Every structure is written in C-alpha cells, then in structure tokens.
Image (cartoon, rainbow, N blue to C red):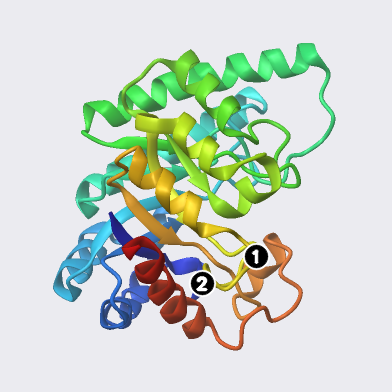
Amino acid sequence: MRFGINSFLFTSPFTTASVSLFPKFKAWGFETVEIPVEDPSHIDPVVVGKAAKDAGLAIGSVCACMGPGRDPRGTPEEQAVGLGYMKALIDQMVLLDCPRLIGPVYSVVGRADAVEPEDYKQQWADVVKNLKELAAYAEARGKLVCLEPLNRFETDFINTTDQGLAMLEAVGSPALKLHLDTFHMNIEEKNQAKAILKAGAHLGHFHACGTDRGTPGNDSLDWAPIVAALKAIHYTGDVVIESFTTDVKVIARAAAIWRRIEPTTEEIAVKGLANLHRLFAV
C-alpha cells in the first residue's frame, strides 16, 4: 500500500501551476498524489506528469468531478457530456502515467431525492450502459475506473458497498472496481470492516478520512478493524487522505464544511500521514 494526498485539501481547481505543491507533498512523506481534474482544460498532462516524477511522486489517481451537466443518469445530453468528460480524463491519465479514475462515476454529486422504483430502474440501466462503455474505453488503455459509493446526503443512487458491487456485477468489466471511503462508510455501513471484506478483490481504491472530514486517526473511528480488513483482503492499492477545510472555499461549500475542523491544512496532511503509518504498522 502507498499513502497519498488529495490536492483538494489545498486548492481548487487544480491547474498546471498547482504542481508547485508536489515538492511539499513529497517532503511530508507522501508517495502518491490524487488530482481532481475539474475540467480537462485546466491541466497540461505532460507538464503535470513530469513535475510529479521530478518531485518523486506518483499520480496514483485522477478524481472525476461530477458537477452539473455531467450526469450519467440524467438527460441523454447530460449522459453524453458526462461520458465524454470521463473519457477525456482517461486520455489524460495515459499522459500522466496514472492508473485509476476514481469517484462517483455514476451520478452528479448532490442529486439526492426520493425516486420511484421504475425511475430508479431506468437510471440503473442508463448507468450500466454508460459504465460499460467507459470501462471498455479504460480497459483498452490499460486503466481502471473505481466507483465510489457516497453518503445519502450526496446521492440517492449508490450509497453502500452492496450497491456498488451490484453495479460492478451488472457492468461485468475487469476494468471497473470499487472505491471505498471511510467518511461515507461511517454514515452508510453497519460495519466498515465487514464491508471491506465483502468488497475483497473488487476494491481498487481507498480514501482515509476522519469522521468529521478532518485528520484520519484524530477522529471517533475505530481504525484497527478497518486496517485489519484491508490487510486481510491483501489490498495493495493507494490509501489517500481526502479531507477538506474552510480554506478552499468552493470545496468547503460543496462538502458543507462550515467551521475550521483542524488548526491548519498542513496539520491534516502531516498528522494524518503520521497516523496512517502508525495505524498500518500494527
């Protein structure tokens, strides 16, 4: 396993100029960086990829930012735009030497409402169709797509490991994996460790987040069984800190971060990484 950091903790949007963060991430001890690409035009993937290598970092994952108009279960136009956006990210991943596209690749974030069973069934069929095409596109380029269940306040579509595994089965592609996040699981799963064990070999990516979106390991979560479960399934992917602060206003608003959870953003990164090393060393 490698430990990584999501750049949303420090900036939004991530642009080519944001590579100035890379030496700092490396100096703190991170091995990988996760880049949310809000629009493909924001980065030059060749320059960003070279900057990461020069800093001694791997770009372990690109995060799909599923904003308005990119809905894989929306109107036909929204589905086409969303699919085109994610394909463009995969094309950039080839130049970035990045193995995984991660995130809620099935829906725009924030679409959460009661849905009639027949409507949900149609949405499911639309997402299966779109993810079949996306997974085939990724597989042809040697990349993975990792689907992230979100909590009920951020989506009404896929909230749990069971639902995520059902989507993987419906799509039926080796290029589609599961992406689990301790923040979302803390809300939706009865038992995080059991959910990880159930995901098993289907787990392709993992977010380590505090229960309050602050520092992992400085929260109310019982990390020991989570770490034990990851080791039990022989998980070898990245463990990425994805925490948010009020310092990055657009992300704070999107994630409902209304107060300063930790003294500084640097503390979340540095103490979070130290906590992960301590927890996973046991």
Question: Does residue 32 appear left or right of residue 217 in this picture?
Answer: left
Q: Amino acid at mark 1?
A: Ser
In this rendering, is residue 272 above or below 157? below
Tell me the residue at 61%/32% (across/down): 78
**Does label 1 or label 2 sit earlier along the sequence?**
2
For the residues labelled 1 and 2, say whether their Cβ atoms are less than 8 Å apart: no
Q: Position of residue 64 (x, y in %)?
A: 47, 47
CA neighbours of label 1 inside 10 A, class few (<14), some (14 to 19), many (20+): few
Farthest-out residue, bottom: 263
Farthest-out residue, front: 282
Looking at the rendered structure, which numbered label has been put on residue 9?
Answer: 2
Q: Position of residue 79 (x, y in %)?
A: 57, 28
CA neighbours of label 2 inside 10 A, class few (<14), some (14 to 19), many (20+): many
Q: Position of residue 161 (x, y in %)?
A: 56, 32
Residue 274 at least partly seen: yes
Tell me the residue at 51%/24% (across/down): 165
| Camera-nearest residue between 50 and 202 | 202
Q: Work out how far the residue at label 1 is from the one at label 2, CA to CA, in angstroms.
A: 21 Å
Residue 43 at least partly seen: no
Quadrant of the rendering where the C terminus is positioned: bottom left
In this rendering, is residue 53 above or below 39? below
Tell me the residue at 46%/73% (across/down): 272
Quadrant of the rendering where the N terminus is positioned: bottom left
Looking at the rendered structure, which numbered label has been put on residue 77?
Answer: none
Describe the element under mark 2 as helix, strand or loop. Answer: helix
Q: Quadrant of residue 121?
A: top right
Q: Nearer the viewer, mark 1 or mark 2?
A: 1
| Camera-nearest residue between 40 and 110 | 110
| Camera-nearest residue between 190 and 164 | 190
Q: Amino acid at mark 2?
A: Leu
Looking at the rendered structure, which numbered label has been put on residue 220?
Answer: 1
